[in-house]
Amino acid sequence: MFAIFPVARIAAPNEPELGKGRDNSSAGKATSSIWPAENESTRFEYEKVALLGEGGQKRCWRIASSDVEGDAVLLEYRYPSSLHDGMFGDYDDGEKEQACREAHEASQIHSEKEVAILQRLKGCDGVLQLRRVIRQEGKGLPAQIHAVVDFHNRGNLKALSMANVRLTEREKLDLSLDLLKGLRSTVANNIYLTDIKAENILLDDSSGRLTATMCDFSDAEISSNLTVEDEKHNLECLLDIIRLDIYGSLENSDIDKLIGHDRAERDVCVQAVLHRLARASKDPALSPVTDGSPRAGARRPAPTPAPRDCSTHRAHS
């Protein structure tokens, strides 16, 4: 477990406590929380605007707050709310307290690990950026940790791909470069990704062009010795996504022609592929895109081979 959070300020007498207990509020309800960081306000007020998605470990809420600039997203990790949480319905009364504590500790491990990774990646290219960390105190249990990150206005890459949106060659190259820069960032910080998929790639066009950002590091691993095999596995997984969800085909993909990539190449690394693609992107025949918007177009052909499984941990010891 990572000890990465300073102690939050305690509310003064006659001052209402902030962030007490789990926030189970629905969209539209304002919530107060503690932000325990140096040189920042200890108060962080936000309002849930809309639920963007949820999984087994967390919910993602779009939030509005005067304490952060622009739009933001709350990564609300799933902690048990109390001993009476529905998840403990099958336990005897004598077992509920222990089960609740164990569930809380498991949630704490997931949240602290992902926040630790987000902190490592702060300021890096192509990866989700951390804005704030929220610490909410609870009765009889350690604090709950949640995170506030950047909002991306175009959803995820899988949704774009399934909608058969036609991208220009310039957009395909730019998105591919973004993702390879993101993987370079994780490799440089000794982070091994175990859940590389198009659903975990966010898109945004608020900068004037369509951009891609890697997200969801709750299952990633912080490694002390990221091996060449680790890097190559993550690279091949990412290239499969670029082939299928950006270029539309796993077999004979244009991306492989651009970078001269050979799947059997043993010593390939992220930086080498990124360099080849960056060189290809300077082709004057690729006219710049002014509005960053994908174009509706023809349906893409179905790929023949199956993509590799990128949702597992290291295959080697």
Image (cartoon, rainbow, N blue to C red):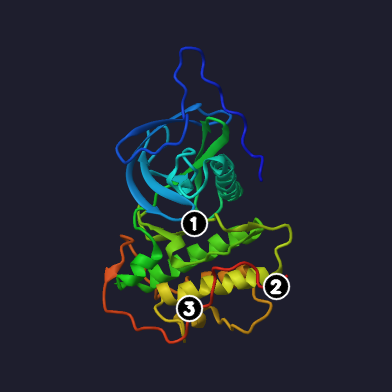
**Front residue of this view, candidates 233 and 9:** 9
CA distance for labels 1 and 3? 22 Å
Residue at 62 percent across and 32 percent down: it is: 6
CA distance for labels 2 and 3? 28 Å
Q: Which residue is mark 3?
A: 255
- Hey, which residue is sitting farthest top in the picture? 14
Circle 3 packing at 10 Å, graded few (<14), some (14-19), many (20+), is many
Q: Going from the N terminus, do you reach mark 1 or mark 3 first? A: 1
Task: Give the SS element for disc 2.
Answer: loop
The C terminus lies in quadrant: bottom right
CA distance for labels 1 and 2? 25 Å
Q: Amino acid at mark 3?
A: Ile
Examine the rendering and report whether any part of residue 279 can be seen. Answer: no
Circle 1 packing at 10 Å, graded few (<14), some (14-19), many (20+), is many
118 lies above or below 262: above
Residue 272 spot, x, y in % from top left: 62, 72
Q: Going from the N terminus, do you reach mark 1 or mark 2 first? A: 1
Q: Amino acid at mark 2?
A: His
Q: Comparing marks 1 and 2, which lies closer to the viewer?
A: 2
Circles 1 and 2: CB atoms closer than 8 Å: no
Residue 316 image label: 2
Residue at 41 percent across and 53 percent down: it is: 54
Q: Going from the N terminus, do you reach mark 2 or mark 3 first? A: 3
**Front residue of this view, candidates 294 and 284:** 294
Circles 2 and 3: CB atoms closer than 8 Å: no
Task: Give the SS element for disc 3.
Answer: helix
Q: Amino acid at mark 1?
A: Cys
Q: Which residue is mark 1?
A: 215
